[in-house]
Amino acid sequence: MKKLRSSVRPYAALFRLRFVRELQYRAAALAGVATQFVWGAMEILLFRAFYETGAETPMTFSQLVTYEWLQQAFLALFMLWFWDADIIECITKGNIAYELARPMGLYRMWFTRVVAQRLSRALLRCVPILLVASLLPSPYRMTLPASPLAFLGFLLTAFLGLLVVAALTMLVYGLTFFTMSPGGVRIFAAAVAELLSGAVVPLPFFPEKLRLIAELSPFAAVQNLPLRIYSGNLAGTEALVFLLVQLFWLLALWALGGGLIRRAQRRVVVQGG
């Protein structure tokens, strides 16, 4: 037990330092809140026009509104187009030498940084958005969870979704070691992830075949699951199956990303003094 505590302590310290550091950017957080609130309102109004056509929809309008507000509130937690500039610079400019000198595993160190950074940014932004969204007039108001069990399921799957995002991010960082330019990998990963995670359009609105492909991908294990559970669109056995898929992708991505980073460490060459 003592050995376990000593091995975990450096990562806990790193998490705390990174978390506190990100909490200092309050002005950026306020700007983000304003942008996300306006963007969320635009998306809801667009969907409102679609619902008024009378077309069949896989989600009630109340579920959709709640999904959209949660998506905006926790954007910093689940966005798959955000990358840590410091880590990218470490890989592309040779500063990786300083990281390798630290008494921590590279993968676990960067994974901890990613989680702390996203969590602190989400904390700064989510409260104002959730507060305002819950006070809006019907039908644009964000509703309470479908049930206490749905709320607990949301908390669990949101936490696991954050870890899946971090594992996906680490996989992209690992691939960056093997490319001449990191931009292509990041742009491609972000484009695919935004579509298949339900960030552009919720997955229930997809054509059946594309929806099945998306739901089996690791991207559906990010925001799609917690937001649909909270809104009541996903429950029971179906939600449990998705939870198992989420756990599978977390373990698979951790193993794949960790192996990629270890391989990169064996091949990396740092020139100069």
Image: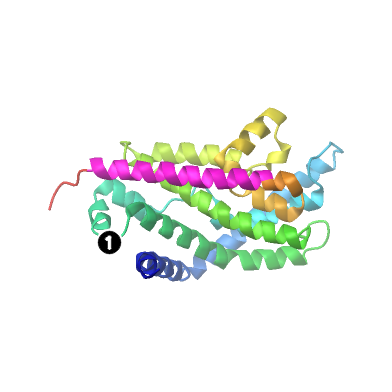
Q: Residue furthest left?
A: 273
> Which residue is at a point 74% across and 45% down the rendered structure image?
237
Name the element at disc 1.
loop
Please tell me whether the stretch drawn in magenta is mainly helix, strand or loop: helix
Residue 87 visible in rendering: yes
Is residue 69 found left or right of 248 in the rendered image? right
Judged left or right of residue 146, residue 156 is left
The magenta segment is 241-268
When the figure is inspected, residue 229 is found, relative to residue 128, above or below; the finding is above
Counting every numbered tag in the picture gives 1
Q: Identify the residue at image location x=51%, y=68%.
A: 27
Task: Tell me which residue sits at (39%, 69%) in the image.
Answer: 5
Residue 265 position in % (x across, y down):
27, 45
Can residue 144 be seen?
Answer: no
Q: Residues within 10 Å of mark 1 (few under 14, many from 20)?
A: few
Q: Which x, y percent locates residue 42?
A: 69, 50
Res 221 → quadrant: top right
Q: Amino acid at mark 1?
A: Pro
Residue 205 is left or right of residue 163, and the answer is right
Q: Which residue is mark 1?
A: 103
Q: Nearer the viewer, residue 242 or 95?
A: 242
Q: Is residue 122 left or right of residue 15?
A: right
Q: Is residue 253 magenta?
A: yes
On screen, residue 172 above or below 122: above
Q: Nearer the viewer, residue 64 or 169?
A: 169
Return the residue nearer the eye: 246 or 215.
246
Q: How is the image coloured?
A: rainbow
In this rendered view, identify the residue nearer to me: 185 or 208: 208
Image coordinates of residue 232 in percent, x first then y, are 77, 52
